[in-house]
Amino acid sequence: MNMRKIGLCSISTNHRAKEHIARASAIIESIGIECFSFFVDERCDESADIVVALGGDGTILRSKKYAKQHGVPVLGVNIGRIGFLSECGIEELGQAINKIQNDAHTVEHNMMLTCTMHDGTKTECTNDFIIYKSRLGSIANFEIMIGGSSYGTVFGDGLVVCTPLGSTGYSLSAGGSIISTSVSAIGVTPICSHSLGARHLIAPAQTDIPIIVNMLSEGILSNDGCEEFKLHIGDSLVITPSNSCFDLIRFKSRNLYNIVRSKLI
């Protein structure tokens, strides 16, 4: 890949963001590539060949707004704690850029999900939608429908509906399975269910088999931890695969199983 310009993004609330951006800029410019920086919570109209997300998984997920707007892939550089979505550390950034220039990389097209709410409002996620109880001490109550068939009524703290990419996040902590990013599937995981029969489910990712959540209590919907929407009794959520995807730069020496072993075991 012949790169002329790289966009660097970080989260403004990170007190060391400017320090990380300065270090990454020096590395990239030493290779002879122009770069600019922006914060993920700001609009940026300047174009780049790729975007380098400096931070943890939250920063990488929030970089999707810029990546989608400009149609470019994201290279995750871990400066956080786990960095499951990242591909290298900042000390390896120079090597990573050289690999991309030499085409020693792949672009992983990760599926996203769309949630259509009762009033027609649509929102997307890359990792997961989390439906949880409205207040501490209460119990969430909702019915789950998959492809027109009832999966049952769930009582508990909430529900995680995740993509394969997001299956290593909250869903995994709640007892869900790890889903390979090469599989077109959706994970449905109850959170602290007050029922012995409520178990994690992997459903096919097909637009004609929607996952419908009918709210039987007040609740809150979160998309990748970025936004929150209030839910009321009687509201219905329809979750389907999105037409969009989230492109991550991956190197051939790393795969899902290597990452799981190094990050989680």
Image (spheres, helix red, strand yellow):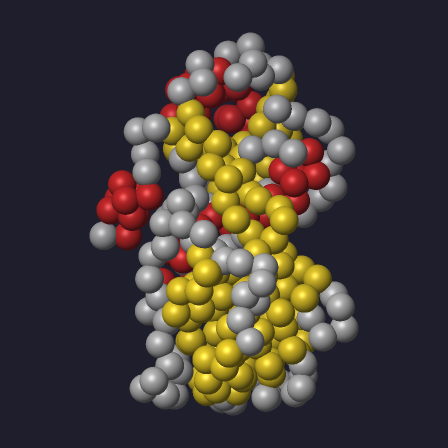
Nearer to us in this view, 223 or 92: 223
Left or right of 63? Residue 55 is left
Residue drawn at (67%, 60%), measured in percent from left and top?
A: 123
Residue drawn at (61%, 24%), measured in percent from left and top?
A: 49
Q: Is residue 156 visible?
A: yes
Residue drawn at (54%, 65%), measured in percent from left and top?
A: 209
Left or right of 15? Residue 117 is right
Nearer to us in this view, 42 or 176: 176
- The picture quadrant where one finds residue 51 is top right
Q: Total number of numbered labels?
A: 0
Q: Is residue 14 visible?
A: no
Left or right of 89? Residue 253 is left
Residue 250 horizontal/vertical position (percent) = 42, 32
Residue 188 in the image: above or below residue 92: below
Residue 69 horizontal/vertical position (percent) = 70, 39
Residue 25 in the image: above or below residue 74: above
Nearer to us in this view, 216 or 40: 216
Residue 100 horizontal/vertical position (percent) = 46, 20
**Residue farthest to the top, as pictured:** 32
- The picture quadrant where one finds residue 99 is top left
Left or right of 35? Residue 263 is left
Nearer to us in this view, 32 or 214: 214
Residue 111 horizontal/vertical position (percent) = 52, 49
Residue drawn at (62%, 59%), measured in percent from left and top?
A: 114
